[in-house]
Amino acid sequence: DADVTQTPRNRITKTGKRIMLECSQTKGHDRMYWYRQDPGLGLRLIYYSFDVKDINKGEISDGYSVSRQAQAKFSLSLESAIPNQTALYFCATSTSWYNEQFFGPGTRLTVL
Amino acid sequence: TQLLEQSPQFLSIQEGENLTVYCNSSSVFSSLQWYRQEPGEGPVLLVTVVTGGEVKKLKRLTFQFGDARKDSSLHITAAQPGDTGLYLCAGGFRGAQKLVFGQGTRLTINP
């Protein structure tokens, strides 16, 4: 069984649509993250949360919002998708020991 | 801005050869992690180093943390096609609550 799951795995949408990406984890970690991956740019942090009442912006939060519904669930929303948000999106959890990250399988999002 | 530079960005070699990839910063890390990512999957943690000069081995992979904790290297001995993937380093900085990732080295091992 996967420890960190993401849905959907693939999504194609149109400019201006609202999109929600969901992440669930069974690792029991308090810390959860959303990253975006683009070719040649590595992983860039969008938002992170250290518990249900704690939400923090990452380096590229503009155009995105998040919701931490429970310790195990962290969702990412694009209120009005635009083409340059086409990317791979990864959810991750971490331990408090040096923030070692455990990633989900990713969501490939295409905005037309 | 805390930046991590990885080199080379792309590396393609023959099975059986040795290789080294590098991760550098002008800042001092409190910890440095290496991840491997295969197509269609998320990155998977390989190792965490936290002490200057530290060396860790994982089968044919050797990870070294620089004495000043500003750089790290990953050496693979007798590379195999199964080593193919994107290798990412990630640095933790004292007082920061998150990691900073390098842009990755895409490694291809040809049979």
Image (cartoon, coloured by chain):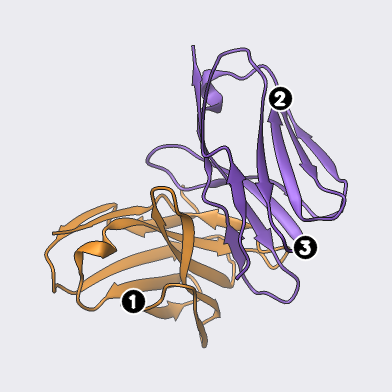
Chain colours: A orange, B purple
Question: Which badge, 3 or 2, is on the more N-terminal residue?
Answer: 3
What residue does disc 3 label? B28
Residue at the image point whose x is 75% and y is 61% from the top: B29
Q: Looking at the figure, which quarter contains the C terminus of chain A?
A: bottom left
Q: Quadrant of residue A13?
A: bottom left
> Callout 3: residue from which chain?
B
What residue does disc 1 label? A64
Vertical relation: B77 (above or below) B88 = above
Q: Nearer the viewer, mark 1 or mark 3?
A: 3
Q: Quadrant of residue B97?
A: bottom right
> Callout 1: residue from which chain?
A
Relative to B62, is A93 on the left or the right?
left
Which type of secondary structure does the marked residue at label 1 adopt? Answer: loop
Mark drawn on residue B96: none
Which type of secondary structure does the marked residue at label 2 adopt? Answer: loop
Give the amino acid type for the residue marked by disc 1 in the picture: Tyr
Residue A93 location in percent, x, y? 55, 63
Relative to A27, is B30 on the left or the right?
right
Residue at the image point whose x is 72% and y is 63% from the top: A98
What residue does disc 2 label? B60
Residue A46 location in percent, x, y? 44, 71
Residue at the image point whose x is 71% and y is 54% from the top: B32
Between B11 and B31, which is closer to the camera in this rendering?
B11
Badge 1 and badge 3 in a common chain: no
Give the amino acid type for the residue marked by disc 3 in the picture: Val
Vertical relation: A49 (above or below) B93 = below
Tell how many labels: 3
